[in-house]
Amino acid sequence: MDALSKINDYNDFLSSLGISDADAFKMMGKNVCFDSGQNKDSLEMRDSEIHGKGVFAIDDIDLDRKWLASFRNYKYLCGRVINHSPDPNCKFIFEGDYVFCVPIKKIEAGSELFVNYRDNVNLESIAIYKQPTEIVEFESKVPSLADWEKSSPIDKIEYELSTMPSGELPLVHIFTEGIYIRKALAPAGSIFTTVHHNTEHQFVLISGTTQVISNDGAFRITGPFMGITKKGTRRLVYAETDSVYFTIHANPDNLTDPDEIVRKITIPIDNPLMDNDDPRFNTWKKDISPSQSISTIITNK
């Protein structure tokens, strides 16, 4: 079966469930710790012509092989990035808290491993996931000529974006002692503006390619890439491919509410062309974009 057939079948599978590829990414990432350094004997992760990254055989693999795919909330290589095919060469076996990946046919070195996602879907989990993520329709404001004339170029771009189909940028909030890290997934084809920063901090494009317009001009970056966001910076970002960003901020008060932190490190924006209550203008808020929080801060010292 060729790559296009596998891709089409995967898209048909998602369509039958009423979810997008970004939805699948968010569901897979919820409450998961990814350890790519273990449970991958004779396997490695490479770019896949099917979808993003995939699992590939380094050696010829016989039917007696077995890899740990997940244990409770921990997912390993086979459980995290193995791709779908209606004609798989592997399957998952569930044993209590453990999920193992086993071959169902011999696999030649250099071949990609596949499972059939249809054999492992949990319809109840998908139904629960959909309940809080239904998008509420919000009518775009009709700006006056006076509003238009006093607005900045980026204000006008934000307004034009608000007239387009809504998207989601899933967020993960990571709190350690004195540090706040925000992880954001920008699905391929998405375009968004950032908040107006009043602090200098690091950002890392972990993966993907994005085009960026900022105070410093226009540029194109491909991950892995590390840069510095300067005070006063605001950006327009277009994701050419699925892209994952980290921004790293000082958090000396060990705050654990990401909205409170953002209010401290940004300058309030008032776009005269948009309603400030418009959720598309507030995707930085934890109750707007699907969010997950991970914290190692002990609050009851």
Image (spheres, helix red, strand yellow):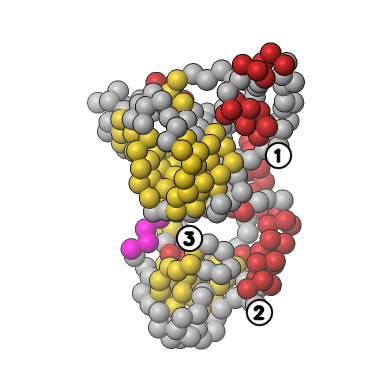
**Where, quadrant-wise, is the N terminus in this rendering?**
bottom right
Which is nearer the N-term, disc 1 or disc 3? Answer: 3
Number of the front mark, 1 or 2: 1
Number of the front mark, 1 or 3: 1
Give the magenta part as a residue range. Answer: 32-37
- Mark 3 in CB contact with mark 2 (< 8 angstroms): no
The residue at which mark 3 appears reads as 80
Which is nearer the N-term, disc 1 or disc 2? Answer: 2
Q: Is residue 25 left or right of residue 181?
A: right
Marks 1/3: CA–CA distance: 29 Å
Please tell me whether the stretch drawn in magenta is mainly helix, strand or loop: loop
The number of callouts visible is: 3
Residue 172 at x, y = what percent?
46, 40
- Along the line of sight, the residue nearer the viewer: 183 or 84: 183
Which is nearer the N-term, disc 3 or disc 2? Answer: 2
Residue 128 at x, y = what percent?
63, 43
Marks 3/2: CA–CA distance: 23 Å
The residue at which mark 1 appears reads as 165
The residue at which mark 2 appears reads as 1
- Mark 1 in CB contact with mark 3 (< 8 angstroms): no
Residue 271 at x, y = what percent?
59, 20
